[in-house]
Each structure stands twice: as C-alpha cells, then as structure tokens.
Image (spheres, grey):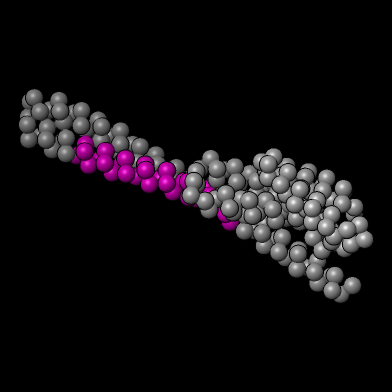
Amino acid sequence: MMKTTFLTELQRKLKGLPESEVMAAVAYYDEYLSEAGPENEAAAIAELGSPAEVAAGIMGDYVYADTTGDKKTTRKGFDAIWLVVLGIFASPIALPLAIFLVGLIFGILLAAVSVVFSLFLTAAIMLVAGIAYLGTGFFTLFFNIPTGFVTIGSGLVLSAVGATMMIVMIWLTKHIVNGVARGGAKLLQRWRSRDATRTASESEVS
C-alpha cells in the first residue's frame, strides 16, 4: 500500500470525527511516512497497521479523552457512543462481531437508561404530588389550620424528595452515557493494541 492510498483510506475511516481532528491525524501520518522516506514507506505502513486499525485507535483515544474531561455532558456522551459505533465498524473485524459489539453497547445503555428513566418518572410524580399537596395545604389553612400545616409539610417533603431524585437521575444519566462511551473507547483501544502487537509479531517472524 502506498502512502497516498493509506492516507486517503485513513481519512475515510475517520469520518465522524471533527474535521480538525481528521486533518490533524492525516497530517501527522503524512509527516511520519514522509520522514520514513520512499525506500522505507512500505515497511513503515506495515508497522502502523491497516488504515482501519489506525482509525480505530484514533477514535478510541478521542472518545476516551472527550468523555474524561471536565465538561462531561449527556449530549457529548451520546456523540461519543456514535463515534464508538463508527469506530467498531471501521475496525478490521468480522461484520457479525461488529454487530454483536454494537448491540451489546446499546443493550447496556438501554437497560441502564430504562432503569434511570423509571426512577426519574417516579421522582417527577412525587414532585407533582408534592406541589399538589402544597396547594391543598394552603387552601386547607382557611378551614383547618393543623390539617393545613400537616398537608403543607407533606407537600414540602414530597417536593424535596422528588426534586432531589430528579437531580440525581439527571446526574446518573450523564455519567452512565459517558461511562458506556468510555467503555467502548477502551474496547477500540484494546483492539488497536492487539492488532498492533499481532502486526509486530508477524513482522518479527518474517
């Protein structure tokens, strides 16, 4: 494989990353292969591995760095999961295995988010009920002060618990999504490391 072919294929496999990241990666490997020289170009490409293997490693590194930074958001996590999916399909693995891995990632994500959503719904119901109790309690004060205060107190407790649960569920969702993305990124990184080790072993044998 020639340098031009390698770089073109690498750029295609990196589709999904920000354009600046793609250009930076292509420029890096362009310079790397240029420094190797025409006489060592083929050997350098063989040492790097296929464009798909290199792309999988780059995507894994990008996703992992993006989901371990200070500004972790749910949207960023979903974007990262999508990049992991693209990275898996870009990797030189069998299609059935790629489908299995993607299904596993989305299965874990769906199960976790479903549990969080059910708890979030419970929290929302408690919050609405608490607000309703507050309104009822203030109205009851005009007729029965003790009952009114008890109702208001119950409303405050329900509202506080519901609001707290909602905040916790939002926090959990963000970390679950980013955690799944980091797990997928590590999967790509390990796949890339395994392929790099295999390529190095094959080079030593040859």
Question: Could you tell whether 104 is left or right of 162 in the image?
Answer: right
> In percent of the image, x 52 and y 48: which residue is there?
177
In the rendering, at what x and y percent does residue 100 appear?
A: 68, 53
> In percent of the image, x 84 and y 74: which residue is there?
204
> In percent of the image, x 57 and y 49: which residue is there?
66
Depth order, front residue of 146/2: 2
Q: How many marks?
A: 0
In the rendering, at what x and y percent does residue 1 appear?
A: 90, 54
Depth order, front residue of 20/48: 20
Question: Could you tell whether 205 is left or right of 80 in the image?
Answer: right
Is any atom of residue 119 visible in this view?
no
In the rendering, at what x and y percent does residue 35 appear?
A: 83, 57
Q: Residue furthest right?
A: 39
81 drawn magenta: no
Depth order, front residue of 16/37: 37
Is any atom of residue 164 visible in this view?
yes
Q: Where is 96 relative to 161, above or below?
A: below
Question: Could you tell whether 158 is left or right of 64 in the image?
Answer: left
In the rendering, at what x and y percent does residue 61 appear?
A: 64, 55
Which image quarter is the C terminus in? bottom right
Q: Residue furthest bottom?
A: 205
> In percent of the image, x 87 and y 48: which residue is there?
4
Q: Where is 37 relative to 138, above or below?
A: below
Question: Which segment did they paint magenta?
Answer: 154-183
